[in-house]
Amino acid sequence: MKVLFVTVLLGLFVSSNLYARRIPECGIERYETRRDPICGNLYKEKRTRHCGVESYNWRWSWKCPGGRQEKRRTWSNCNGTAYCGEAGYELIRRERGHICYARPRSGDHYSSDAICIRPEITKYCSHPDFGVKNYNLCRSRSHGFEQYKECEDPSFGAIYNDCEVTKDKAELTEYIETMENLAESLVLAYAAGTSNYLALIKAEKALGCTILKYEENDQASVANTLADKYFIVFSRPYEASQFNRDYCMDYEPSIPSLDEAGCENISSVECNTLQSIESSRESIIRETSLIMTLLQEPVSAAYENLSERLETLNDYLTKGIN
């Protein structure tokens, strides 16, 4: 009845499914984000001179690329008619210029001056001299306070990485505590089934060597239970002095499988006993497999005491069926 209770309880309790979780043991992905004074001030967004110029006004002007300013020049000629002396210039008028020769009696001789102009060329463009059309859009202290900036900071709390784990810390602790209470019963169920089978086939030496194995494994309560079975079946107490490791090498208990024993669809005391042994062994193997999975996960790696307790459980259960 005790064995059945343990088996049912484990069936309800054990789960080896992986779940994606965000827990501290997965490591920190980033920190929470919020608006807070520690993030600094966020000032109002405006277009002002504090932001720099985005664009200037557009006009037709010689100041634009490809344009040129109007230019006036004068060419003088003391020996004839003056003309514009450079290509691109246009004659506006001629006038008397400076004195070339001073002739008091007949009158001074003046130069002929050509007043010329190079016309202005205008292009359409924007230019700093035309004034600012738009300032850049920016935030500046001069615009006034709007709100606090948004930032990540450890003081706001952590967002953990998403990782797959079988159990979080609380679940793992609960599982370990449960298994520490059940481990002996699991091994005892397997050992009891083994002793029952050996008793059925009157394998006294094999049963004595099984007791010795549990004594050497420091599983005294299991060994004592089997010693009681030994006394009941063989009508004499188990004497440890009768058995040793060398002796027992020839009497290792050989437990056949259900197929080897021809127990398919057969109900008998022997087959039922072998079924009990196989079920107990599978329960332990299932637990040791789960324990090995848990030992490789970040939760147990983060807590040395939990990892050590899992290793102790695994060692106890493994020895119990080997």
Image (cartoon, grey):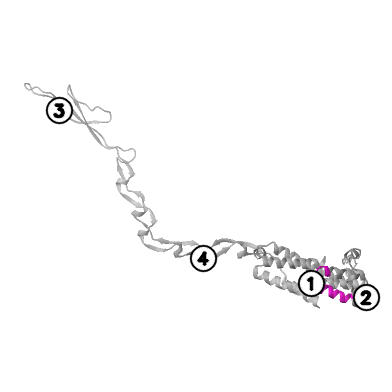
Name the amino acid, label 1.
Leu
Few, some or many residues within 10 Å of mark 1 (<14, 14–19, 20+): many
How far is disc 4 from disc 2 in space, using C-alphas?
71 Å
Q: Regarding mark 2 in the picture, which secondary structure is present there?
A: helix
- In the displayed structure image, the side of residue 41 where residue 131 appears, left or right: left
> Which comes before the other along the chain, label 1 or label 4?
4
Q: Regarding mark 3 in the picture, which secondary structure is present there?
A: strand
Q: Which residue is mark 2?
A: 234
Instruction: Give 237 or 210, whichever is nearer the viewer.
Output: 237
Q: Which mark is residue 233?
A: none
- In the displayed structure image, the side of residue 140 where residue 236 appears, left or right: right
Name the amino acid, label 4.
Ser
How far is disc 1 from disc 3 in space, using C-alphas?
130 Å
> Which comes before the other along the chain, label 1 or label 3?
3
Q: Which residues are magenta?
A: 214-230
How far is disc 1 from disc 2 in space, using C-alphas?
25 Å
**Residue 293 location, x and y as percent?**
71, 63
Q: Which residue is mark 4?
A: 155
**Residue 194 location, x and y as percent?**
86, 70
Q: Which residue is mark 1?
A: 186
> Which comes before the other along the chain, label 2 or label 3?
3
Instruction: Give 80 or 231, whichever is nearer the viewer.
Output: 231
Q: Residue furthest front?
A: 241
Asked whether the beta carbons under mark 2 and mark 3 sit within 8 Å of each other, the answer is: no
Name the amino acid, label 2.
Phe
| Quadrant (top left/top right/bottom left/bottom right) for the N terminus | bottom right
Residue 157: quarter of image? bottom right
Of circles 4 and 3, which is in front?
4
